[in-house]
Amino acid sequence: MHRIRKSSGGYTLVETLVAGAILMGVLVPATMFLGRVTAGQKTRSLIIASNLAQETMERTLAAGVFENETMEVASGGRTWMIQKKIGSMNGLVTVNVSVFSGRGDTPLAVLTTMRYNENHE
């Protein structure tokens, strides 16, 4: 009779499954945490951009000076580009404020309003 020898050099299926379960128990919460951190940063950027757009719009309307303007502002540890475009027709002035992160192509916040101004053509 021949004896069959068991090799002690590998892992059993149960050991492999337990190791996989432990690894998943660590990776899933870590991935969820990193996703929340990234989402928090995006939300913070959107809030800052919205506040900058609103502040620029309010200052423009309060001053009554309707001119196209592009400016850079530092806020929240970043540089933001604010673009103000003015359009008018028959005394109706359109004010459009867009806020970009750095020199990005897509604005993070856009506000538009219209006002009647008999002095502006």
Image (cartoon, rainbow, N blue to C red):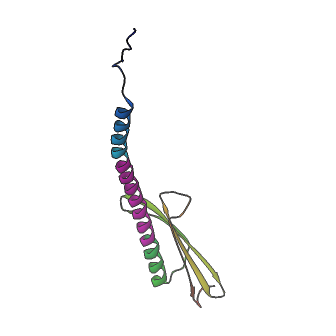
Residue 63 position (above or below residue 22): below
Q: Quadrant of residue 48?
A: bottom left
Residue at position x 50%, y 65% from top?
108
Residue 96 position (above or below residue 70): below
Q: 76 or 13, which lies in front? A: 13
Query: Percent x, y for residue 19?
Result: 34, 36
Residue 57 visible in the picture: yes
Query: Percent x, y for residue 45?
Result: 42, 62
- Inspect the magenta stretch and tell me whether residue 56 lies in it: no
- Inspect the magenta stretch and tell me whether residue 47 lies in it: yes
Q: 113 or 118, which lies in front? A: 113
Residue 24 position (above or below residue 70): above
Residue at position x 34%, y 33% from top?
15
Region of the chain picked out in magenta, as a range:
28-51
- Secondary structure mainly formed by the magenta segment: helix
Residue 89 position (above or below residue 34): below
Residue 70 shown left or right of residue 77 in the figure = right
Q: 19 or 72, which lies in front? A: 19
- The quadrant the C terminus occupies is bottom right
Q: 43 or 119, which lies in front? A: 43
Residue at position x 36%, y 62% from top?
76
Residue at position x 57%, y 89% from top?
117
